Image (cartoon, rainbow, N blue to C red):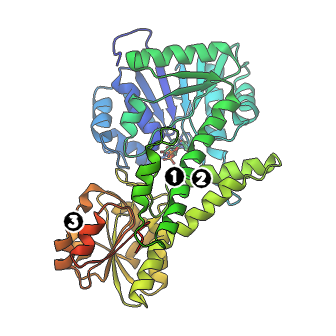
Amino acid sequence: MNTTSTPRHVISVFGLGRVGLITAVCFARRGYKVIGIDPDNHKLDRIRSGEPLFFEPGLHDYTKAAISNGLLTVTNDPLANTGSDLSYLTVGTPSNLDGSINLDYLKNATASVGKSIRKSSTYQTVVIKSTVTPGTARNVVRPILESESGKSVGLEFGLCSNPEFLREGSAIHDAEFPDRIVIGSNDMKSIDNMETFYKELHGEHTPTVIRTSHENAELIKYANNAFLALKVSFINSIANITERVPGADVKTIATGIGLDNRIGPKFLNAGLGWGGSCLPKDLKELSSYSKTLGYDFTLIEAAIRVNDYQKQRAVEIAQMKLGSLIGKRIAILGLSFKPGTDDMRDAVSVPIIEGLLARGATVVAFDPAAVRNARGIFGNKIAYATDPMNCISGADCAIIVTEWPEFDISPSMFLKLMRYPMVIDGRRVYEAELFIRSGIDFSAIGLGT
Ligand code: NAD
């Protein structure tokens, strides 16, 4: 990647959550001066000490380096970006109860940027990276910027929609090597500026740049996540059939269809459903937004329904096999919504554990990264193990909820440590035949019995 070229931008990032902090440290890594702005003082202190509040592979090293070389400074001063030439909006856009998204954080941050533009003599380009409903850049962000700054978009400052596609767990890699860059705007100068910046940032690794309207950029993000969720809900539906067909296995079926290059192998891993901070929220929003346009996006609603059902499969299987769950000790291997992160937002472990507790089970859980966040959700309603072996010891059933590499446990260990050796492989990480042959009472999503 290019680290030497000029001109050098001064970049502000509003919102130092998962997207914002990753964005900020990756820019600093390339030598840009970055000002990170967030109202959360605790978060800021942790970043200043080089110990961010959340886990992401590589993030500690990047943060420590950016703070110690002075390229990243963080502050709660909303006007600290005065003088920057790029201002990124990476604040959260959480779901409202009706499925639509809450734009309050975005509106607040936008107002701050507008005020700073009023004071600034630099031509600033504002970049919306938060995931927002189509029309937000045009109808929400632009009017706030223009009224707070007293200046005109396209003439005195720029505005772009630049959705983020990074995946938690590989976020730094994805930020440094994106597979495409989408830049939406109504003014060509903003698009040109951003394309030039990204070419300077990524050098020979610059991927395809899609230059388009705000609305297309905003919709690309939703369509992207909706498609991924549909693919998983599709294979999970196939899994629910294969479980009822002796001799059938969804894994083989996924391999078979994934080799069709019109389909591809990714996002065809059957399991306990999708969760996380993006897919559930973005699908709800796409469905809610479609309704405002007079279109019932039934496909999305079906994907959500399939997913809701899928999250309860492990509880159903445990109950079917063990009968009553009252007093049964269930080991939960994996709490985060996916491996490589400590993010528990909409993690499927939550409804699974709630389902087990409601049926009277005792739950002991282990996760390499997410225990701190899980404690915030479950408190002392469940026990937390210090390692996977400790988690399965004395259990009547072990459920693999997140496919962390740490759960590479041999059948003999399950047999040795568990009170009753029952394993529910919710992520298809084990070799089924080996486990069944060893005498384990083994079930797996999509495995016909
Ligand atoms: P987050 O909740 O982790 O972080 C948001 C941050 O914004 C918080 O630190 C909060 O304190 C800060 N904030 C709130 N109001 C502010 C203000 N007025 N000024 C400055 N900072 C403010 O959210 P996230 O997961 O980083 O997601 C951010 C956006 O990116 C969302 O729209 C999300 O949908 C989208 N997105 C997330 C991911 C992901 O993997 N997490 C991936 C792609 C896109």
**Considering only order in the chain, which callout, 3 or 1, is on the residue closer to the N terminus?**
1
Residue lying at 65% horizontally and 17% vertically, measured from the top left: 157
Q: Is residue 314 above or below residue 77?
A: below
- Is 140 situated left or right of 421 in this image? right
Element at label 1: loop
Q: Is residue 207 above or below residue 307?
A: above
- Mark number, residue 157: none
Residue 100 in view (yes/no): no
Residue lying at 51% horizontally and 22% vertically, measured from the top left: 208
**Considering only order in the chain, which callout, 2 or 3, is on the residue closer to the N terminus?**
2
Mark nearest the camera among 1 and 3 is 3
Q: Determine which residue is flagged by label 3.
A: 409
Answer few, some or many: residues within 10 Å of disc 2's Cα (few below 14, many 20 plus, some between 14 and 19).
many
Q: Residue furthest front?
A: 247
Whether disc 1's CB lies below 8 Å from ligand 1 is answered yes
Residue 239 in picture, x, y percent from top left: 48, 64
Residue lying at 31% horizontally and 57% vertically, measured from the top left: 404
Q: Are marks 3 and 2 in contact (CB under 8 Å)?
A: no
Q: Amino acid at mark 2?
A: Lys
Residue 390 in picture, x, y percent from top left: 21, 73
Q: Which residue is at the front of the view, 346 or 375?
A: 346
- Mark number, residue 281: 2
Q: Which residue is at the front of the view, 435 or 419?
A: 435
Residue 25 quadrant: top left
Q: Residue furthest right?
A: 294
Q: CA distance from mark 1 to mark 3?
A: 29 Å
- Mark number, residue 277: 1
Element at label 3: loop
Q: Is residue 128 above or below residue 296?
A: above
Mark nearest the camera among 3 and 2 is 3
Whether disc 3's CB lies below 8 Å from ligand 1 is answered no
Residue lying at 44% horizontally and 73% vertically, measured from the top left: 314
